[in-house]
Image (cartoon, rainbow, N blue to C red):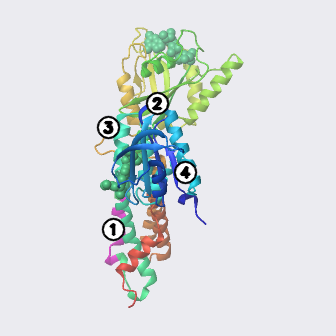
Amino acid sequence: MLSRHQDPIVAIATAPGRGAVGIVRVSSPQDMTPLVQALCGRTLKPREASYLPFRAEGGDPIDHGLALLFPAPHSYTGEHVLELQAHGGPVVLQLLLARCMALGATLKLRLRLAEPGEFTQRAFLNGKLDLAQAEAVSDLIDASTEAAARSASRALAGALSTEVGELRDALIKLRMLVEATLDFPEEEIDFLQQADALGRLARLRERLDAVLARTRQGALLREGIKVVLAGQPNVGKSSLLNALAGAELAIVTPIPGTTRDKVSQTIQIEGVPLHISDTAGLREATDEVERIGVARSWDAIEEADVVLFLHDLTRVGLPEYEAEDADIRARLSTVDPARIVQVFNKADSTAVPEGQVLPDEALKLSAKTGLGLNELRQSLLQHVGWQSTPEGLFIARERHVQALGRTREHLALAMAVATQAPPALDLLAEELRLSHDALGEITGTFSADELLGEIFSKFCIGK
Ligand SMILES: Nc1nc2c(c(=O)[nH]1)N(C=O)[C@@H](CNc1ccc(C(=O)N[C@@H](CCC(=O)O)C(=O)O)cc1)CN2
Ligand SMILES: Nc1nc2c(ncn2[C@@H]2O[C@H](COP(=O)(O)OP(=O)(O)OP(=O)(O)O)[C@@H](O)[C@H]2O)c(=O)[nH]1
Ligand SMILES: [Mg+2]
């Protein structure tokens, strides 16, 4: 039975709507000469643009455009690819698409509409791209900042894949040593001493840590961070959101309890997306609407990467104000302190109470004048471990960070086993296998054959 991955697929490749040029693209594992002949009225030279009419059923042209044939395997998908580059009107492109589908039926090609990402999926299945590169294609298209686009392009060119590949090669060498000792005990390979397996493990983990750190940066750039503005009513949360966003997004009034719903906006600092939420001031709510708003504030705090706990400098020290702040502090005690940043707002005001000593790490700023906002921005980036635009940054995903984390865990377990005397070789082999599996998830290239190939190419099995 033919799998759905063997069906020819077709889609409009360009964005919907009007455009100067629009492309309909077909990818097929089978030769496309009959389709090309019927549609273009002639055969095409490989990888050469031909200007010709795209013919409707009766022979009339749907449009005149450029046809391009990329014979397999030298195409984006690794299959035969036909591109019809037409005028970019939505109706023209729909007609071309429908014509391809109709010809597919007549010629019994099993041609169907492509699913989202299916051309790139084929590129992955045919080894044109690995999984991390395929993901980078999508990240490049979705990039909303220059930094994101540049780093997605680097990932597409294989920056993450290369790093992972180097780790994988080192891991395979280690596995070879251990598996060989297991499989050929008569060889009496004392791999621990002779091959310095422990040293190799330690070096591998060091390299892994370096890749993990860079991958985290890449993931930050892609996923961004969730920042929540929290604190008593009237401390200036909405004013701070507006100041950071540079727009009047949330309503600001001197009336405590102005904000009731969560107001969110994504801004960027040094290309890192910050998803900022302004929330209802935290207090014992006086009505049903506010009560729900405050409950949402707490939900937002739970989910945040960073909580900006805002205070009002003009009121610090006042007994009633301090009592309210203490209540909030008590409830915030369940939140990891590393996620909380203390911010004292209204530093522009002359009414700052005398003799007030602020915590060392606290930030003083003014949402009104913008004083201290740059320090806040830097502090936010620092808080999530952003290192100012390192050269060669590649975009990455939380999935990659997680996979590298699991790779590291199994490596640490392997090290623990290897340090025992005598080491339990089967356990060691298992932890290394699990580590290798986790690493392989990133590029999607893991296969047992690869490992066996390495082992048997280096050892003389006939001995
Ligand atoms: N018109 C058009 N532009 C496009 C694409 C496309 O499919 N069509 N792309 C995609 O959506 C991107 C380019 N990606 C591509 C990747 C590989 C090959 C290709 O033909 N590869 C062959 C030959 C390589 C070579 O000549 O060096 C190969 O891999 O063997 C084509 C496009 C962006 N621009
Ligand atoms: N002097 C001074 N006043 C400020 C500053 N920031 C905010 N305010 C004033 O403080 C009052 C409350 O500001 P908001 O931004 O609405 O405060 P909030 O924390 O969102 O209040 P709720 O929505 O009620 O929780 C307004 O009158 C602002 O003009 C500041 O930096 N300096
Ligand atoms: Mg508000």
Q: Nearer the viewer, mark 3 or mark 1?
A: 3
Identify the amino acid type marked 4.
Leu
Residue at the image point whose x is 60% and y is 30% from the top: 298
Tell me which numbered mark, 2 or 3, is placed earlier along the sequence: 2
Tell me which numbered mark, 1 or 4, is placed earlier along the sequence: 4
Q: Nearer the viewer, mark 2 or mark 4?
A: 4
Picture quadrant of residue 271: top left
Give the residues drawn in magenta, as a range. 193-205
**Dot 1 crowding, Cα within 10 Å, few <14, some 14–19, many 20+:** few
Identify the amino acid type marked 3.
Ser
Identify the amino acid type marked 1.
Gly
**449 is higher (above) or lower (below) than 236:** below
Of residues 111 and 206, the one drawn nearer to the viewer in this rendering: 111
Q: Give SS at disc 2.
A: loop
Judging by the rendered image, the residue that carries numbered circle 2 is 18
Of residues 35 and 255, the one drawn nearer to the viewer in this rendering: 35
Judging by the rendered image, the residue that carries numbered circle 1 is 199
Q: CA distance from mark 2 to mark 4?
A: 25 Å
Q: CA distance from mark 2 to mark 3?
A: 40 Å
**Dot 4 crowding, Cα within 10 Å, few <14, some 14–19, many 20+:** many
